[in-house]
Image (tube, grey):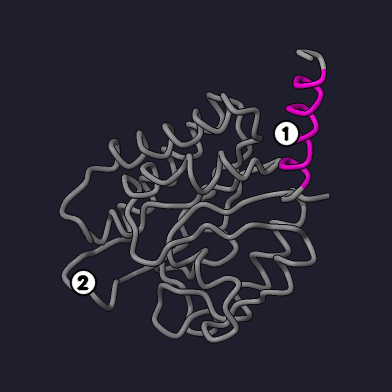
Amino acid sequence: MKRILTLIAIAFTLTAQGQYRAALMGDSIFDSWDSVKHGGHPEFFSQNRILNCGKSGQVTSQMVERFNRDIIQNAPKTVFICGGTNDIAQNKGYIPNRQIAKNIATMAETAEKAGIEVVLCSLLPAAKYPWKTEIKPVKPIAGLNRRIKKLAKRKNYGFIDFYTPLAAKDGSLPKTLSKDGVHPNSDCYNIMESILKKWLE
């Protein structure tokens, strides 16, 4: 009986892991990716068996709170984590980069313990936030991206640099890739998809 229950448990785990090749954990940058209304491409997710767990407006501490429910319980093979721009925008008050990086590390470690491959993603460029015009995000974004890259290297996680191929010389997200300087348009998502696909091959 014990052997049968063990086999059932294994089968259940394999089924769950086979449901999604990957999952995205993030904020509106990911949330809008499968929304035609916001310039996204839902077919990219269905064709590649990707679960989108982006939640608009969220800071990294909120992502940590739902990480088990949204990521661990769905058991994807790989999780792509991209968060922190809303922290820098002070959506929930001032949060230093070291704490943002710590929140990202917490999610990554949780996934690693569950046997899920971890890929950390750099923040996208932004020169200003339309909803928080007093914030100057260029330097904080660059600083946080350095922390994320170092974390990935230290822990042997994957790392995707979305920033470099998307950024203008002034650290902004160009008008050709975004309506508001923060959120990607369809062309921007095309570039991001070409980058992400390399990790799905």
Q: Amino acid at mark 2?
A: Lys
Disc 2 crowd rating (10 Å Cα; few below 14, some 14-19, many 20+) is: few
Q: Which mark is residue 13?
A: 1
Farthest-out residue, top: 2
N-terminal of the pair, mark 2 or mark 1, is 1
**Which quadrant does the N terminus fall into?**
top right
Q: Is residue 5 magenta?
A: yes
Out of 61 and 152, give the one closest to the viewer: 61
The prevailing secondary structure element of the residues shown in magenta is: helix
Quadrant of res 114: top right
Identify the residue under disc 2: 132
Q: Which mark is residue 70?
A: none
The magenta segment: 4-18
Q: Is residue 143 left or right of residue 45?
A: left
Q: Is residue 130 left or right of residue 47?
A: left
Q: Position of residue 2 (x, y in %)?
A: 76, 13
Q: Is residue 172 above or below residue 39?
A: above
For the point 74% across and 67% down, which residue is it? Answer: 46
Q: Is residue 101 above or below residue 191?
A: above
The total of numbered circles placed on residues is 2
Q: Nearer the viewer, mark 2 or mark 1?
A: 1
Q: CA distance from mark 2 to mark 1?
A: 44 Å
Q: Is residue 43 left or right of residue 130?
A: right
Q: Is residue 135 above or below residue 181?
A: above
Q: Amino acid at mark 1?
A: Thr
Out of 61 and 93, give the one closest to the viewer: 61
For the point 48% across and 78% down, which residue is it? Answer: 174
Q: Position of residue 35 (x, y in %)?
A: 57, 78
